[in-house]
Amino acid sequence: QVQLAESGGGLVQPGGSLRLSCAAPASIFSIYDMAWYRQAPGKQRELVALIRGSITKYLDDVKGRFTISRDNAKNTVYLQMNSLKPEDTAVYYCTVGRYSGGGYYAQYWGQGTQVTASS
């Protein structure tokens, strides 16, 4: 079982920022792609952002506000979230998987971290 260590969630006012972090085992991080999903209450889970080398993809709703990046020296992927909106409120999950022209397949999941944008 692969352990993904997520951190950085919390409560922030609309318009604020948060940065999520996810550390993965070195053996996994070096060969897999990574992505963040989110799931809000009563809604379907959705792919927020993914990264494969220099390629990044984003959900339309977060383009220009969220940035995914990875630090290979720390085996960590980040999700910088700016200009947060109440509709960004959800549990955010870090995943490790594979991305190809056919889409992204998540193989391992973190435990999730709550992000709440509310005044």
Image: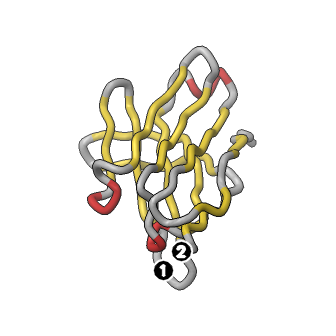
Task: Locate the C terminus by quadrant.
Answer: bottom right
Label count reads 2
Q: Is residue 114 left or right of residue 96?
A: right
- Where residue 25 appears, x then y in whole percent? 69, 28
Please determine whether, in this image, residue 113 is positioned above or below residue 86. above
* Residue that mark 1 sits on: 43
Measuring from the top left, give residue 56's x and y in whole percent.
Answer: 32, 37
Q: Secondary structure at mark 2?
A: loop
Q: Amino acid at mark 1?
A: Lys
Left-right relation of 28 to 59: right
Q: Report the front residue among 91 and 1.
A: 91
Kindly identify the residue that appears in the image at 40 percent across and 48 percent down: 66
**Residue 91 x/y as whole percent:** 60, 65
Q: Residue furthest top?
A: 73
CB contact under 8 Å: marks 1 and 2 = yes
Residue at image location 60% in from the left, 29% down from the top: 76
Tell me, for residue 11, which label it has, or none: none
Rate crowding at label 1 as few (under 14), some (14 to 19) or many (20 or more) other CA atoms within 10 Å: few
User: Which residue is at the front of the view, 8 or 83?
Assistant: 83
Q: Where does residue 86 sit, x and y in percent of width and height?
A: 48, 72
Name the residue at 37% across, 40% down: 99
Q: Which label was assigned to residue 40?
A: 2
